[in-house]
């Protein structure tokens, strides 16, 4: 199917309408024109609209997933900060500062740069020693 050669009803400028396209913007007068597709073009319009809908759904899903991940990270950091603060009298200020720095993302300690493993294990070991003694 080739493009349709029509004229703008407002300014009579030539318009090229691709098959299946229902909304066109006139390049001369900037009028937004809506065309009713023929029966042959209806399948193309349905396919385009379905692709647009699927793309919108995917974008929304990715945004929701990103927001959820950010919320989970914020909750984890808040819990880890509470543990670090409560363990401060037990483990001492030097380890406490390292632990708190790791929680805030300064990566002073940790296994692979995430700053989580070593300080948390140190704090848990100190808590266990304190509780068992």
Image: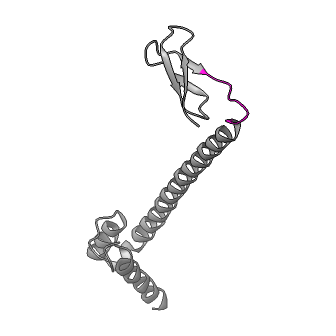
For the rendered model, the colour scheme is one colour
Q: Residue at x 62, y 35 (%)?
A: 20
Q: In which quarter of the image is the C terminus?
A: bottom left
Residue 23 picture quarter = top right
Left or right position of 4 against 50: left
Which residue ends up furthest to the front in the rendered image?
Answer: 2
Which residue ends up furthest to the top in the rendered image?
Answer: 11
Residue 103 picture quarter = bottom left
Left or right position of 126 against 107: right
> Considering only vertical position in the picture, is 130 above or below 93?
below
Q: In which quarter of the image is the N terminus?
A: top right
* Magenta highlight on residue 38: yes
What percent of the width, then of the height, locates residue 82? 45, 66
What percent of the width, then of the height, locates residue 73? 47, 62
What percent of the width, then of the height, locates residue 118? 35, 81
Q: Residue at x 61, y 42 (%)?
A: 48
Q: Residue at x 41, y 74 (%)?
A: 87
What percent of the width, then of the height, locates residue 38? 70, 30
Residues drawn in magenta: 34-41
**Main SS category, magenta section:** loop
Q: Which of 107 and 8 is in front in this view?
A: 8
């Amino acid at each position: 199917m080739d493009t349709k050669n029509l004229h703008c009803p407002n300014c009579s400028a030539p318009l090229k309408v691709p098959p299946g396209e229902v909304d066109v913007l006139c390049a001369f007068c900037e009028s937004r024109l809506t065309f009713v597709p023929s029966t042959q073009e209806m399948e193309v319009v349905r396919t385009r609209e379905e692709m647009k809908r699927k793309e919108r759904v995917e974008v929304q899903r990715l945004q929701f997933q990103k927001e959820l991940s950010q919320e989970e990270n914020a909750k984890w950091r808040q819990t880890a900060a509470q543990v670090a603060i409560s363990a401060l009298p037990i483990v001492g200020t030097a380890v406490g500062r390292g632990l708190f720095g790791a929680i805030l993302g300064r990566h002073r300690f940790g296994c692979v740069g995430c700053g989580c493993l070593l300080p948390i294990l140190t704090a848990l070991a100190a808590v266990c020693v304190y509780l068992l003694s």
